[in-house]
Image (tube, rainbow, N blue to C red):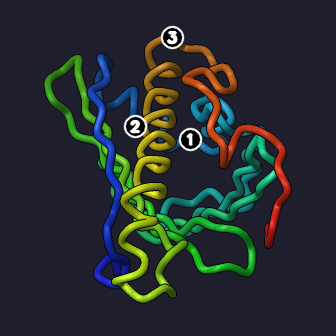
Amino acid sequence: MNAHRFRWPVAVTHSIEAPAEDVWAAMSMPGNLELCHPFCAQNPVTVWSQAASRDEIHYLSGWVYERRFIRWIDGVGYDLKVGAQGENKSLVSWRLEEVDHATSKLTITAYPQVLQKIPVGLRWIPHVVYIRPMLRRYLSAVIRGVEWFVTRAEPVPRNQFGSHPWFSQKTAQVGR
């Protein structure tokens, strides 16, 4: 998985009042981001075959990221590389844990690639002040979107948990 080469992962965990099987069904179906992701405009699937799965996420902001799955653990989660075509990809890990028959816990951990080329001493401040808070906000909205879909059986409305400056609105797309 090469998580060791990424520094300072950002993780969010959230309890969902639904059986783990229901959450897994939502997480593992092709095109699921169109139903569960509050900043997703489209989620076209190229291949859907567990660890060989590939799709794209088209954000409301106009950014398009490729998602290439690299590990799939049935009923538990998956790891994937995600990022814009032709750019370095960040590692993202989704893990599901059953708390009891009616409750589960979902954790998404992102290993952001964005500052990896900057010397460690210089990237710490932008990571702590900007990247980490923005990623936590984003990951929290994504998990809450999964919860929305699983518990209400309806797609999460776009920007349901507030807008996000990276993924919600059209902006000047430098390098994207």
| Residue at the (51%, 70%) spot, across then down | 90
Q: Nearer the viewer, residue 157 or 170?
A: 170
Amino acid type, residue under disc 1 in the picture:
Met
Q: Nearer the viewer, mark 3 or mark 1?
A: 3
Mark 2 surroundings within 10 Å by alpha-carbon count, few (fewer than 14), some (14 through 19), many (20 or more): many
> Circle 2 sits on which residue?
24
* Relative image position of residue 27 (x, y in whole percent): 48, 40
Indicate left or right for 97 with 69 as reference: left
Residue 35: name its quadrant: top right
> Circle 3 sits on which residue?
152
| Residue at the (56%, 41%) spot, across then down | 29
| Residue at the (47%, 71%) spot, across then down | 70
What separation in Å lies between label 2 and label 1 (alpha carbons)? 8 Å
* Relative image position of residue 144 (x, y in whole percent): 45, 27
- Which quarter shows the C terminus? bottom right
Dot 2: element: helix
Q: Are marks 2 and 1 in contact (CB under 8 Å)?
A: no
> Measured along the vertical axis of the image, is residue 3 above or below residue 95?
below
> Measured along the vertical axis of the image, is residue 50 above or below residue 8?
above
Earlier sequence position, callout 3 versus callout 2: 2
> Circle 1 sits on which residue?
29
Amino acid type, residue under disc 3 in the picture:
Arg
Mark 3 surroundings within 10 Å by alpha-carbon count, few (fewer than 14), some (14 through 19), many (20 or more): few
- Which quarter shows the N terminus? bottom left
Amino acid type, residue under disc 2 in the picture:
Trp
* Relative image position of residue 157 (x, y in whole percent): 66, 20
